[in-house]
Amino acid sequence: MSLVEELVLERPTFVQRVRRGDPLIYVLSGILILIVLCALFAPFLAPYPPNQGNILAANLGPSSAHWLGTDQLGRDILSRLLFGARLSLLGPSLIIVFATTFALALAVSSVWIGGWFDQAVARLLDTLFAFPGLLLAILAVAMIGPGLLAPVIALTLAYTPYIARVVRTVVLRERHLAYVESCQVVGLSGWQICFRHLIPNVSPIVLAQATIAFGSALVDLAAISYLGLGVQPPQAEWGLMVSDGQSALLNGSPWESLSACVMIIVVVLTVNVLGERIALRNEGAA
Amino acid sequence: MRQLARTVVGALITILTSSFIVFAALSASPGNAATILAGNRATAKTIKEIAHRYGLDRPFLTRYMHWLSGAVHGNFGISLQYRVSVASLLKPRIGSTFMLITMAGIIILVLGVGSAIVATRFSRLNMPVTISSGLFIAVPTFVAALILVELFALQVNWFPVLGASSGSISDRLWHLTLPAFALALSWAAFVAQVSRASLRGEANREHVQTARGRGLTESQVFRRHVLRNGAIPIVTVFGLTVAGLVAGSVVVEQAFGIDGIGSFLVQSVAAKDTNCVMAIALILVVCFVVVTALADMIYWLLDPRVRSGLSR
Amino acid sequence: MDPVLAIEHLHVELPVRSEMRTVLHDVSLTIGPSEALGLVGESGSGKSMTARSIMRLLQPGAATTGTILFEGVDVLSMHHDALLAFRRRGVAMIYQDPRAHINPVRTIGDFLTEGILLDRSVSAAKAQAKVVSLLDEVGIPDAKRRLRQYPHQLSGGLLQRVMIAAALSEEPRLLLADEPTTALDVTTQEEVMAILDELRVERSLAMLFITHDLDLAAAVTDRVAAMYAGVIVEVGDAASLHTDALHPYTVGLLDSRPEFGTRVRARPIPGRPILASEAPPGCVFAERCPYVTELCRSERPTLREVGGRFVACHRAEELRGTISYARTQEPR
């Protein structure tokens, strides 16, 4: 009897869990939230309207009036960076939310149905997951026309198999754990098992994967805008700013391109390390 | 042998399906081909004539079969933009793209796999390799392109800024160096990470300990057991990488003003030249499928368990 | 005669995350030439660690003190070349799970000849011939075909025989067998054990036989050592183990085996086995021992000779022959 009492564990309180958590995760999430807030409150934070330009003040370096300088049309780079954050972050968010949802649905149902269906899905995913989203996005633009819609749809389609493949592996492992069989024996329906047990148990890994995929999606979208097939001028978007500023860079004024580059790198780095940390934390707990 | 046949058949089916999707998607796009061909001031009658002349008024499946059979022979129809055969526009451009991708591939092999091997074998180098690969993987291709141009072409003047040149082989190589690095950088970092994970995973396996316990030297243990076993996922990831390189080359060609297939694709999309877009799309899909199938076959060669039909 | 292996006061700590954890507190044992010593203990007692320490196969960063003498030479202070020579021709190890311990992408032939071919002067043909005769000795027919096969094509029992053949290929003087039959099913266990025993006796090899099965150890070895929480608690003659065990833990192990033919419930030792790192300052068995005293809790007993056996217990003499778990005793 005393043996049982010895072994009883208590669920840690919220405060205890926060204190024991990985500090890096909090820092990185904080950075991300900060950037998102800047994007949301851009109209209040930006010193100038993003499209207001003065040709006479074109391609100026950083100064007290323009902290990051001006672009080739005389628009303030800092303001365009803040407003650009909106589109640069919105696109990948949509892509990842939809792709992850589809991927989860596909993976879970495939594993649950099992048999030849699961085998077929597995082979399909193995073939598709490596197909570059960028190419699909370019083709989508060829079909529908430039803008944000075509690339977002295409990239959602491209990222679904990529995420689904990882999710399927994890769900497969989880599905074969003993507790699932006990649930079935007790009489829980497939839906119940999937929603109340399988999905919550795989969600940390799915979250980690989605976080990292966010970075890739951001890069792909920025690349599409860089190529001139995505967000169109005069709208502000980081990828577009990089290509807009390229001729200025070749002539000695790298400010527009480089500041947009830095923003992209910062977000992608943050998101990558964050995703890795989440995965690590889950591994440690397992 | 049966495995081989299955891979080949699978590849063919994928190509066929993709070609159908490509054709269906792009034939249904706005900007009717006939209208574009006819030009700005054409009348309805002229458009109809042109449509008939180029077979654009025939039923869908007929057009698809016609296009597909032509494509197999290298005939992709007429460019809507330039009024010459698509094939003649593509031929000169394939060379630059091919050289670019090959160079990038070599850089990835040396830097990516090389750094992973070094990091696993000499554990003191593990931390710097991890950090630098984590950093470079976050740098998108076009960003790398610009930063490299800024640093090595503008600040230091070691490499030319634009163009691929059509001079001697060595001149072309020199022009393509910065673009190849820009293309290779983030992929090399990715390959380095995956390779390192694979090699480290192998290094911790029990059979490695058996080998060490028998008195093999560390380098013998590494070569015969860690590297040999860890190579398998590395090969797979390399196949993935080549696919990504093809996509990345589009961006790099645009950034450096290289006249290759990639930049031509972007140009054709912007000009709504669907014939060219379809041709390039098909070529890219075929390349992708072939590379993936090759990677599958090499995997099959390397891992005897797959040969016996056991799952990976 | 000098012992083949003499371990004295071996103490091992391993780095776990950022701290050092003790896995072996104090291990001392000797194995004479041609002698088989059984090392018995539950999971976590440190048996495998002992074997790995002998071969210096611990993870980097491990801290080891004490001495391990192989034919009079201290393994722990051997330099690189001497260590490799020791691993090649002095000692050989057989592992628990043959499937995990043999490289799955190389052939059986490659595995078997790898050790022999380290000596450059041996030709491939000679190596192959030797390996074929070894496979014959372990009872694997059709050796030439087997050499070309891969591990996944052989059953667990066959693989373990291959492992034994590989271990013997370099003619070691000491054999370390880490639970060689645990992963096999019962009938295969017997076959493999028979082959191992026969070959060992034939070649007069010294052997350290690690297992959690007391009866198995008593059957195949000359002496048995019992291990608990990183400490050797008793060493003695295998034949008299059942009747003359002195340490409360050993007696507890013997008593806890279920009996055939009766309907008496099995009697486990109360409490749970602890890891070496969880051990209290005094005797490691103090928390679970029904005969524990204040002395036991404060001072860790060392191995000393009592009645022909070695035991690490303060009360060995007085408790001799009276240890029983049938009813709990009041701690005095």
Image (cartoon, coloured by chain):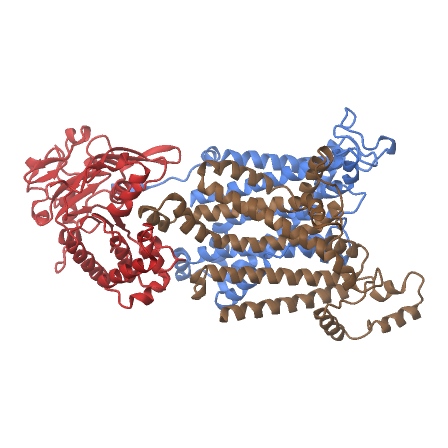
Chain colours: A blue, B brown, C red
Q: Is residue C234 above or below residue C159?
A: above
Does residue A153 appear in the picture of this structure? Answer: no
Q: Is residue A94 above or below residue A45?
A: below
In the image, residue C47 sits, relative to residue A77, either above or below, namely below
Report x, y in % for residue B92.
75, 58
The answer to which of A29 and A224 lies nearer the viewer is: A224
Where residue B155 appears, x then y in whole percent?
72, 33
Height in image: A282 above or below B280?
above
Q: What residue appears at the point 53 percent right and 49 percent down from the top-left corner?
A: A206
User: Is A137 positioned to the left or the right of A109 in the image?
Assistant: right
Residue C197 seen in render: yes
Q: Quadrant of residue A257?
A: top right
Q: Residue at x 72, y 73 (%)?
A: B69
Residue at the spot 68% in from the left edge and 57% down from the top edge: A136
Q: Which residue, as the protein is rendered here, is positioned at the far top?
A: A64
Image coordinates of residue A72 in percent, x first then y, are 82, 36
Left or right placement of residue B32 versus residue B161 in this view: right
Of residues B164 and A96, which is closer to you in this image?
B164
Q: x and y percent of residue C243 in the render?
A: 7, 48
